[in-house]
Amino acid sequence: MSENQPDNKEQTVFKEEGASIEGAQAQESEKKTSTGLDRNVAALLCYLAGFVTGIVFLVIEKEDRFVRFHALQSIVTFVIIFVASLVLTAIPLIGWIIGLLLSPLSVVLWIVLMLKAYQGKEFKLPIAGNIAEKQLDQMGNK
């Protein structure tokens, strides 16, 4: 029994260190925005209904750069996907096949973007993320 006590102490110390690191990360992601929501929840919601919720959060969020970035990236990303889908449906057969491939990829991208936003990461897509960042800088949120 005495052999187990040092192991328990080590485990307890290890758990406390891990908990403090997790606690610091949780505090960072739980900052409130001007909407009253936690910033990671607001960022996730920017992607929920595509560019529509992106527009909503861009209009109502005035202060938090993280949320505004995700709102702009949502708008740019899903407008590009929407326009590409419209163009592809106008092209018979080949466009329809490509459109069928684009749909599940869009869903996967949508889920990844929501997860990254909820984790508090500014996950930047190559083209849409750069456009969103430039637009955000022009709006004065540096």
Image: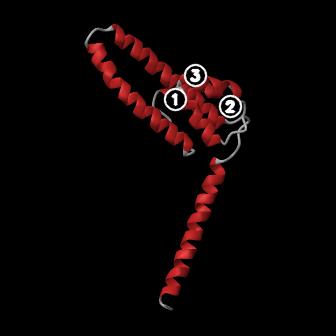
Residue shown at 30%/14% (left/top)?
95
Cα gap from disc 1 to disc 2, whole angstroms: 15 Å
Figure coloring: secondary structure
Residue shown at 59%/64% (left/top)?
19
Labels 3 & 2 near each other (Cβ < 8 A): no
Which of 81/96 is in front? 96
Residue 141's mark? 2
**Which residue in the protein does label 3 denote?**
52
Disc 2 marks which amino acid? Asn
Asked which secondary structure carries label 1, the reply is helix
**Which residue in the protein does label 1 denote?**
130
Asked which secondary structure carries label 3, the reply is helix
Disc 3 marks which amino acid? Val
Q: Is residue 121 visible?
A: no
Q: Which residue is farthest front?
A: 1
The percent coordinates of residue 45 (x first, y second) are 59, 33
Between disc 1 and disc 3, whose residue precedes? 3
Between disc 1 and disc 2, whose residue precedes? 1
Which of 132/142 is in front? 132
